[in-house]
Amino acid sequence: MKPIYVTQPALPPLEEFIPYLQQIWDSRVLTNQGPMHQALEQQLCDHLGVEHISLFANGTLALVTALQALRISGEVITTPYSFVATSHALLWNGISPVFSDIDPQTLNLDPAKLEAAITPHTSAILPVHCYGTPCDMDAIQRIADDYNLRVIYDAAHAFGVRQRGQSVLKAGDLSILSFHATKVFNTFEGGAIVSPDAKTKQRIDHLKNFGFVNETTVVAAGINGKMSEVNAAFGLLQLKHVDAALQRRAEIEALYRERLKDLPGLRLLSPPPADTTRNHSYFPVLVTPEFTVSRDRLYQLLKDQGIHGRRYFYPLISEFQMYRHLPSARADGLPVAHALSRQVLCLPIYPALADADVHRIADLLCQAAELRLQAAA
Ligand SMILES: Cc1ncc(COP(=O)(O)O)c(C=O)c1O
């Protein structure tokens, strides 16, 4: 049987992409904010319900640049429960990450723990909308306002997510997106920064183009973060298919929930409040100590059957060699993140996953749940 991975990139029919390539061949504009790039920025603003977007070659460069644009320095409070790029962007800016624990329901930064992590050197908070679940943005903003901190959201997982009708990408000072192949909306590689105003977008656009403001003036040690015309063209095509892709993801999640809701010891995350528009980018389950087998045993049992789930996010960022010396990286200061990273398993979810495959995966989990009964019999 063909292996099933945690995700599979959504690709439109190849023939639909050829006319876009033809336009690029005709224009010979390959990069540097060409027509495809400009069109995608505009269409993404319309689609996502935001006003200012700067496209990037990937989400990590977007994050590095967002921190530069706001001149963030000193210490930044962030979550250990994320992909390493979140904290790596801080190190690339010479900023010290300070890890704070997560909320056991949302798996996002727990606002109640943030104040204890603030020091005179803290300049910002870098939360992640993990799995596309919105952070408690109001509570985070209240703390940021009280202590005069900036908030930059790593919204790499949050394409299209809204709360109370409003894009979550509008929260805080800046948000970054990733359009990596594994994301719900992909441009092969890609990313973006969402800015609140035209002036901030302009500064970001300079920074992603080596700091050039015109042919002869360079105002900052900018980087080359530009998205190419091919990637932007692909994004324009992907946008036409993204609603159908999100719809199929919702169906798959509903099927998983129906099949797995009563398995003893297997915890499903509660969906966010009903006024949230979700993107179903991941389907994590928590294999608690009450489940018949350990998380790692379940991971292996599935793998042996060709089902490749992923333990996102294990190990925690704070456990990697370049972070574990930090006082805030100690496991006893991050009990929730530590425990849940040892329970989590993300099951395959992507638009081309067939119902029959979801049933097969659910059957394997059900069988695992029955192992103890069989052993006792
Ligand atoms: C939470 C998070 N932040 C940042 C990134 C980095 O994005 P990219 O791979 O586009 O550089 C990713 C994923 O790749 C991510 O999952």
Image (tube, rainbow, N blue to C red):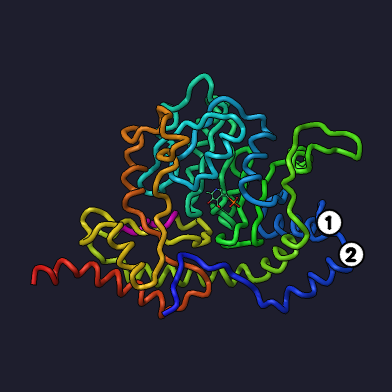
- According to the picture, the residue beneath numbered tag 1 turns out to be 34
Give the residue displayed 19% in from the left and 70% down from the top: 370
Q: Is residue 320 visible?
A: yes
- How far from the left and from the top, in percent, is residue 301? 30, 67
Task: Please identify the quadrant where the C terminus is shown.
Answer: bottom left
Q: Which residue type carries mark 1?
A: Gly
Q: Residues within 10 Å of mark 1 (few under 14, many from 20)?
A: some
Neighbor class of circle 2 (other Cα within 10 Å; few <14, some 14-19, many 20+) is few
The residue lying at 54 percent from left, 54 percent from top is 157
Asked if the residues shown at circle 2 and circle 1 are in contact, with their CB atoms under 8 angstroms apart, the answer is: yes
In magenta, the rendered stretch is 267-272
Q: First in sequence: mark 2 or mark 1?
A: 2
Q: Is residue 114 above or below residue 275?
A: above
Q: Pinpoint residue 192: horizontal percent, then vertical percent.
A: 67, 50
For the point 47% across and 35% down, the residue is 322
Apparent side of residue 175 relative to residue 264 in the rendered image (left or right): right
**Dot 2 amino acid type:** Ser
Q: Which residue is mark 2?
A: 27
Determine whether 215 is above or below 27 in the image.
Answer: above
Q: Is residue 180 magenta?
A: no
The answer, for residue 52, to whether it is visible in the render is no
Residue 270, magenta (yes or no): yes
Question: Is residue 223 left or right of 63 when viewed as pictured?
Answer: right
Q: Residue at x 65, y 45 (%)?
A: 61
